[in-house]
Image (spheres, rainbow, N blue to C red):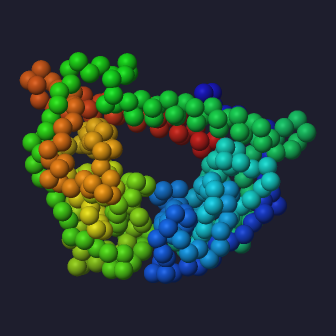
Amino acid sequence: MKEINTENWQEFQIGKLFQVSRGRRFVVGKHKEGNIPYYSASLENNGITDYISNPLFIDKNAIIVTTFCDAFYAKGEFTASDEITILHHEKMNEINGLFIASAIRKNAWKYSFKVKAFQTRIIEDTIKLPINKKGELDWEYMESYMKNIMQESERDIENLKNICNKKKEIELNNWKSFTIGKLFENIVKPPVLHTKNVTENINGIPYVVRTKFNNGIKYNVEKTLQMQPSPAGTISFGAENATFFYQEREYVSGRDIYYIDTRHLTKYACLFVVTSLQTIAEKYSYNYGMFPELVKKEEIKLPVNKKGEPDWDYKENYMKNIMQNTQSKLDKLVCC
């Protein structure tokens, strides 16, 4: 897609363009598990830090802005902490909302721990957006542009999903089945930390739990001397929520979380392996947990070299290409 031309765009004050409100403080210890997204000041998972059943209020379909000026479109019902500014507009939908959120994030350089993006500052901030021939905000252009970007990105992501399927994108003639337990001998059960034993801290260590979202990370927690973190560079999975994730940082975890020791592999090779491993996950459920003894007996298909051994170089190069191509598309989301 051609570079976007912002020459004829116009500055809009956020407080005048949107209906603005603020979330409400809700202590983490009082959260009850549920399915309502709870937004707080997090860089990860589009700002979602929990799923609860007892919100103090419910909002829906809005842009949320964190105190670090990370902006995301929140689709459907949600609730939020007092660190969140909520923006509404009658013409805004998920697609053009993503466009505007990317424009808001361009202001993030102004904010820090000392100068946070609270509602009083956000409403005074300005963003540059396209206008039509009448000099009005061009909602149709924003939606059309974002749809094109999303379609391009979806094509790259689909290639990644097809990595272990017999599709024309990948030639599988030189692939071979490997028993996971023989390929990765060290599958570890790390120490368990329950939610009541950790303290949320955005600058802390990732807390990995049985979730399919946000790389398995519920939120970051304060690191203590008593913790025995799992090492970076390993692949985590939950026994009762069969999803594999590559963990780039050291982390702690909740109940029924395990990890495969893949520290001898590069990040990109591990990401390739994660996709292969995910092909076995669908047979497991809460009634039939994916425990290490079962995982070790499973088989996955991987490309091999001339010696019949796993071709780690191929995996790394393939993933690098996929990620670079996808990133080039996603970079266009920051469109002004």
- Is residue 107 among the parts visible in the rendering? no
Q: Is residue 167 above or below residue 22?
A: above
Lateral position of residue 99 relative to residue 153, left or right: right
Residue 254 falls in which quadrant of the image? Answer: bottom left
- Is residue 290 among the parts visible in the rendering? yes
Q: Residue at x 22, y 31 (%)?
A: 301
Lateral position of residue 308 relative to residue 82, left or right: left
- The image position of residue 75, as x and y in percent, is 63, 54
Q: Is residue 112 above or below residue 167?
A: below
Instruction: Pick the quarter of the image with the N terminus.
Output: top right
- The image position of residue 334, as x and y in percent, is 60, 44
Which residue reaches farthest front? 287
- The image position of residue 251, as x and y in percent, is 29, 64
Q: Residue at x 21, y 56 (%)?
A: 291
- The image position of residue 320, as x and y in percent, is 35, 34
Q: Residue at x 31, y 31 (%)?
A: 164
Q: Residue at x 42, y 66 (%)?
A: 219
Lateral position of residue 84 relative to residue 290, left or right: right
Instruction: Pick the quarter of the image with the C terminus.
Output: top right
